[in-house]
Each structure stands twice: as structure tokens, then as C-alpha cells.
Image (cartoon, rainbow, N blue to C red):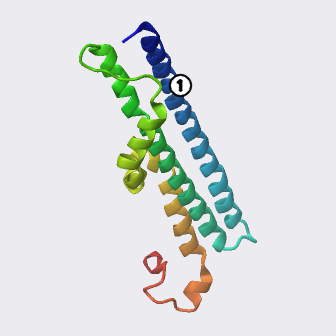
Amino acid sequence: MDIDSVSLLKEEYFNLQKVIEDFDSKTITIKAWSITGSLAAIAAGLTEKGQPGIFIVGAIASLLFWIVEAYYKAYQLSYYKRIEEIEAFFSEPEKNKTAPLQTSNRWLDSYHKIYRGRIIYLMWWPAIMLPHIVILIGGIYLFCVNNHALKACGAVKLSLCHWCW
């Protein structure tokens, strides 16, 4: 492999590392939005004039942010295959031949073959699941505890909140 190709592979490798690090900062932003938006809705439900349905809005918002974070993790993980190829090349250049500037091809291949169908699996990774699941469960619990209309009308055990009372 010529010196220009090796130089391009090094540059590609460091750019991929930057992209992966940027995903981590975006993940923190998603968590911050989830906490802010979901807990604001739950706090609004705790006021005297708050409606119990607001707790469900907070819980659903947390669930949606949880799903978005899992997709972001899938996008991030899809870059690792290309990084592994470049690292293999630099560890044993004679055995591992790889062309430079193949990030998009490897990302698409990795995402579609490995990660696209594993979003639900990724959602249960502790680093992704928290704090979303805590807010989701808390919002549902507060809805059940504070929804006097469901209790007053004698909601059946098949309702969403039968386990709350």
C-alpha cells in the first residue's frame, strides 16, 4: 500500500474516533433533555391544579427519549467495524489489506446487518436505560396513585393501573 493510502487511513481512523466521541456528548444531551422535559411534566402534575394525565405525558416523553438514545447508540456502534478494520491493518499490514475512505460503506453494512434490528436489546443496556426507566416507572406510578377518577369508577383489574391499588 502506498504512503498516501496509509496517510488517508490514519486520518480516517482519527476522524472516526472523533465521531464516536461526539456521539457520547449527544447521548448526554439526550439524557439531559429527557430529565428536564419528563420531570417538568411530572412536577406540573404534582401541583394542586395538576392533572394526573400529565404524569403519563412525562412517562411517555421519557420512553421516547429512551428509544432515541438507543438509536443513537446503534448509530455509534456501527462505526466500530471500520475502526477495527483500520486497526487490524496497522497491526499487521501484510495480512490485512483495506482501502481508505470506506467509512460510509462499512457503516451502512454494519448498521443494516447488526444494529438496526437490535434497538430493543440496546435499550436494556444500563448506560442507555438509566435514567429513562426510572422516570417512566415513576410517571406511571404517580399517575396510578393520583388518578382518583380511575379509583372512583371502580376500574377493572385489566386497566393500566390495577397493580397500583
- Horizontal side of residue 45 vs 84, given as left or right: right
- Give the percent coordinates (x, y) of residue 159: 48, 83
Q: State which quadrant residue 151 falls in.
A: bottom right
Quick check: can you spot residue 59?
A: yes
Q: Label 1 belongs to which residue?
A: 18
- Give the percent coordinates (x, y) of residue 49: 76, 71
Q: Residue furthest top?
A: 3
| Residue pictured at 74% horizontal, 70% vertical | 48
Q: Callout 1: helix, strand or loop?
A: helix
Image quadrant where one finds the N terminus: top left
- Give the percent coordinates (x, y) of residue 124: 39, 52
Q: Nearer the viewer, residue 111 or 162?
A: 111
Q: Nearer the viewer, residue 25 or 57?
A: 25
Q: State which quadrant residue 143 falls in.
A: bottom right
In the figure, 7 relative to 127: above or below?
A: above
| Residue pictured at 66% horizontal, 69% vertical | 54
Q: Residue furthest right?
A: 49
- Give the percent coordinates (x, y) of residue 69: 52, 48
Q: Residue furthest front?
A: 2
| Residue pictured at 45% horizontal, 21% vertical | 13
Q: Residue furthest bottom?
A: 153
Q: Nearer the viewer, residue 5 or 146?
A: 5
Q: State which quadrant residue 55 falls in.
A: bottom right
Q: Amino acid at mark 1?
A: Lys
Q: Badge 1 local density, few (<14 within 10 Å), some, or many (20+)?
A: few
Quick check: can you spot residue 125?
A: no
Total labels: the figure holds 1
In the figure, 89 relative to 106: above or below?
A: above
